[in-house]
């Protein structure tokens, strides 16, 4: 990780900051992330009804992983994040899953360094983290995440994008008006502006090898990017004559 990104990421290791950020998420009817998380689970289940391993990269408090583990009771979850305080918060939230969750500290751009095996995950998730990365880091993130996928595995990234200026202003104004009055503001932290647009995310995902990819949901400046890796090729029949 470049020094600038490493310095910006240091704030996530502060317990007070991590707790304040997690506490700023709206709940109940104001939780705008509940629907795209469920959409991701349903899309995956339609073609992969029984995933065995779900990896959540830069998992934070574990909200996305929680939805997938509820949707797939037979799946084991791997939580990965660089923040030890987030590990504590996620441990509380995911405690009901017991030994179905394996917690690992590691860099989102290099998940293999945390011991995650290439090709070992049926589902890879990430949420509200990749927008902190520069262009080169973003592509490295998608490559590292895609490398974890087993053939036919699914990748889902729920993250913020950078709309053009006029639409960014409109979205932010309307979103503020729709937020609950008692919502706690998230503490300020580094973003690598200008944020990558939706087309850049899709291009990076497809360049990483997940060619079957799309935007399954979008609200304001947040998108659910989702795609499926190519399935395994059937083994050649040695008795079949070559054309």
Image (cartoon, rainbow, N blue to C red):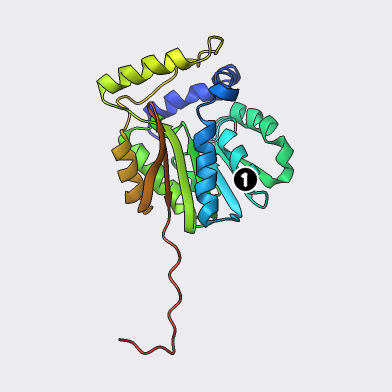
Side of 176 where 31 appears, left or right? right
Q: Is residue 223 visible?
A: no
Residue displayed at 43% across by 33% down: 159
Residue displayed at 31% across by 17% down: 169
Q: Is residue 3 visible?
A: yes
Front-most of 22 and 86? 22
Side of 74 where 235 appears, left or right? left
State which quadrant residue 237 falls in: bottom left
State which quadrant residue 19 falls in: top right
Residue displayed at 36% across by 46% down: 205
Front-most of 31 and 100? 31
Total tally of numbered discs in the picture: 1
Q: Secondary structure at mark 1?
A: helix
Against 173, residue 34 (above or below) is below
Q: Position of residue 60 (x, y in %)?
A: 56, 31
Side of 48 where 133 appears, left or right? left
Badge 1 crowding class, 10 Å Cα cut-off, few under 14, some 14 to 19, many 20 or more, is some
Considering the image in quadrants, where does the N terminus appear? Answer: top left
Residue displayed at 49% across by 39% down: 126
Q: Determine which residue is flagged by label 1.
A: 71
Q: Position of residue 210 (x, y in %)?
A: 38, 52
Q: Position of residue 23 (x, y in %)?
A: 59, 19
State which quadrant residue 223 falls in: top left
Q: Position of residue 161 (x, y in %)?
A: 36, 30
Considering the image in quadrants, where does the C terminus appear? Answer: bottom left
Against 184, residue 213 (above or below) is below
Residue placed farthest to the top in the image?
A: 181
Against 39, residue 186 (above or below) is above
């Amino acid at each position: 990780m470049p020094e600038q990104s490493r310095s910006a990421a240091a704030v996530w290791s502060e317990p007070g900051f991590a707790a304040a950020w997690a506490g700023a998420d709206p709940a109940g009817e104001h939780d705008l992330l509940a629907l795209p998380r469920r959409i991701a689970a349903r899309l995956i289940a339609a073609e992969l009804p029984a995933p065995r391993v779900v990896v959540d990269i830069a998992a934070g408090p574990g909200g996305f992983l929680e939805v997938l583990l509820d949707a797939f009771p037979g799946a084991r979850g791997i939580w990965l994040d660089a923040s030890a305080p987030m590990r504590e918060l996620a441990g509380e939230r995911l405690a009901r899953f017991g030994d179905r969750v394996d917690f690992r500290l590691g860099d989102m751009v290099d998940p293999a360094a945390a011991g995650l095996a290439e090709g070992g995950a049926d589902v890879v998730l990430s949420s509200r983290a990749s927008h902190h990365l520069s262009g080169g880091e973003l592509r490295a993130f998608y490559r590292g995440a895609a490398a974890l996928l087993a053939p036919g595995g699914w990748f889902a990234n729920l993250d913020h994008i950078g709309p053009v200026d006029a639409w960014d202003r409109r979205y932010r104004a309307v979103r503020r008006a729709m937020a609950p009055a008692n919502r706690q503001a998230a503490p300020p932290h580094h973003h690598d502006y200008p944020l990558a647009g939706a087309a850049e995310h899709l291009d990076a995902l497809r360049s990483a090898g997940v060619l079957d990819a799309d935007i399954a949901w979008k609200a304001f400046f947040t998108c659910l990017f989702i795609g499926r890796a190519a399935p395994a090729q059937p083994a050649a029949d040695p008795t079949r004559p070559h054309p």
